[in-house]
């Protein structure tokens, strides 16, 4: 399925199942149009957008607004699939109108940005979502254990005098989700897995046939907590960058299919926000523009193109019930042409996202999308998309 065309490599148009596009409410960080341009340029024909907008996507009118905005700003651009909030205002108290959200077009439900939710409400949400045929994505974090944390808990956090986020804040909730998924026999998807303990639990669960799925992000594979020393707040993200051992466990898990997919957790922020003191700056890394180049580094770590297509396309499509075409003749043209050799400098001008907050700023990355066809239309390309 993969061949060389004039030095360019053909891959299917990819899926990013976890982005924050900030509209409505935080358009100064990103808006739907800029987020979709970053997606198209990054090789993604589908993005799933989290619910922590303002207002929060906890009712049909917000979902409809997002979908209208996407259509209006770029009728033939990448597809935006909203993720609905599990609870009203993401406050963890009252279930959001999930049926109404599903009807409006949400493709999953999530609790991002939420203080710890009690198990009883979470269980009801998982059951109700599944009745609607949709999955719950849990941003695994015990918010009491993670409270006020800014960085991985360990030697570095003590050295810097910053409150740490222990890996157990994540793994405890991963364990809860696994046990609940087993008990209910309902799938739960685990967001942005960052540590070894979580990987070990997921491995155990999968061996038992428990229907959980999990994701991690390129930044957990290529950076450790040391990046906070080097890149300051640009490396501040939640869950935090962890240790070499965690990194190795994640890579191994991805290779073995213990972790199912890669996502960017694209979290654009404005410069003035990231210029604050470490403890005060918001969490997040802008990821849509750099994800594919970073993922291509996996080719040197025992991954094949087929693996990459699985992680960024086939598997997320299966997990969330999305369309994905693996370049079969007679189908709509959904593909990207990538120059594997091109080196590009990551800087504010080469990033299509409004969010310039990436630790790779000033670094050269290899591999660049040159053309992106989606639904038979050229949505990104050197000459045809103004601004490139
Ligand atoms: O780093 C993060 N940024 N983690 C989250 O869970 C939220 C996200 C955001 O919305 O900025
Ligand atoms: Zn999250
Ligand atoms: Zn997120």
Image (cartoon, rainbow, N blue to C red):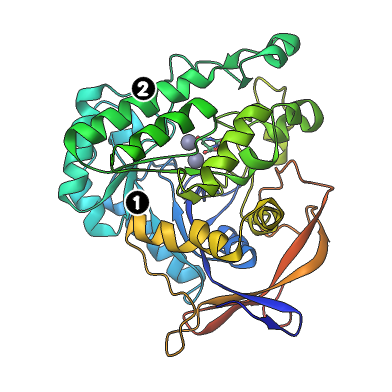
Q: Is residue 176 visible?
A: yes
**Residue under label 1:** 62
Residue 125: x %, y % from top left:
22, 37
In front here: 269 or 288?
288
Q: Which of marks 2 and 1 is nearer the N terminus?
A: 1
- Mark 2 or 1, closer to the camera: 2
Secondary structure of the residue carrying tag 1 is helix
Q: In this view, does 242 lie to the left or right of 118?
A: right
On-image quarter of the C terminus:
bottom right
In front here: 308 or 126?
308
Secondary structure of the residue carrying tag 2 is loop
**Residue under label 2:** 116
Q: Is residue 224 left or right of residue 240?
A: right
Residue 353: x %, y % from top left:
65, 55
Q: Residue 387: which quarter of the image?
A: bottom right
Q: Name the residue located 25 percent from the left edge and 35 percent from the top edge.
A: 181
* Residue 74 to residue 111: above or below: below
* Residue 169 to residue 269: above or below: above
* Residue 15 to residue 76: above or below: above
Q: Residues within 10 Å of mark 1 (few under 14, many from 20)?
A: many
On-image quarter of the N terminus:
bottom right
> Number of marks in the image?
2
* Residue 378 to residue 128: above or below: below
Residue 320: x %, y % from top left:
34, 56
Residue 213: x %, y % from top left:
37, 44
Rounded to the nearest angstrom, the CA distance separating label 2 from label 1 is 24 Å
């Amino acid at each position: 399925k993969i061949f060389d065309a004039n030095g360019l490599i053909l891959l299917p148009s990819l899926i990013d199942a976890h982005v924050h596009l900030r509209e409505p409410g935080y358009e100064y960080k990103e808006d739907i149009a800029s987020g979709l341009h970053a997606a198209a340029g990054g090789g993604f024909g589908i993005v799933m957008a989290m619910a922590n907008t303002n207002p929060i996507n906890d009712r049909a009118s917000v979902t409809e607004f997002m979908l209208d905005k996407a259509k209006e700003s770029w009728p033939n651009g990448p597809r935006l699939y909203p993720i609905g909030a599990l609870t009203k205002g993401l406050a963890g108290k009252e279930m959001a109108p999930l049926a109404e959200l599903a009807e409006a077009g949400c493709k999953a439900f999530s609790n991002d940005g939420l203080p710890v939710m009690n198990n009883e409400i979470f269980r009801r949400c998982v059951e109700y979502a599944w009745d609607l045929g949709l999955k719950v994505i849990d941003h695994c974090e015990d918010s009491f254990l993670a409270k006020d944390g800014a960085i991985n808990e360990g030697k570095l956090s003590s050295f810097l005098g910053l409150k740490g986020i222990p890996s157990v804040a994540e793994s405890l909730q991963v364990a809860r989700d696994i046990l609940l998924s087993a008990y209910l026999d309902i799938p739960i998807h685990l967001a942005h897995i960052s540590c070894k303990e979580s990987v070990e639990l997921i491995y155990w669960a999968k061996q038992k046939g428990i229907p959980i799925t999990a994701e991690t992000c390129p930044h957990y594979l290529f950076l450790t907590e040391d990046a906070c020393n080097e890149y300051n707040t640009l490396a501040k993200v939640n869950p935090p960058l962890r240790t070499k051992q965690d990194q190795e466990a994640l890579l191994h898990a991805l290779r073995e299919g213990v972790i199912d997919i890669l996502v960017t957790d694209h979290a654009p922020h404005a410069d003035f926000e990231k210029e604050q003191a470490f403890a005060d700056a918001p969490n997040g890394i802008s990821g849509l523009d750099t994800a594919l180049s970073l993922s291509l580094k996996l080719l040197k770590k025992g991954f094949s193109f087929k693996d990459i297509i699985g992680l960024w396309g086939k598997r997320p499509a299966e997990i969330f019930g999305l369309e994905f075409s693996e370049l079969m003749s007679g189908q709509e043209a959904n593909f990207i042409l990538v120059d594997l050799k091109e080196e590009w400098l990551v800087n504010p001008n080469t990033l299509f996202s409004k969010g310039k907050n990436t630790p790779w700023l000033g670094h050269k990355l290899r591999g660049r999308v040159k053309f992106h066809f989606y639904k038979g239309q050229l949505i990104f390309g050197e000459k045809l998309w103004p601004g490139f």
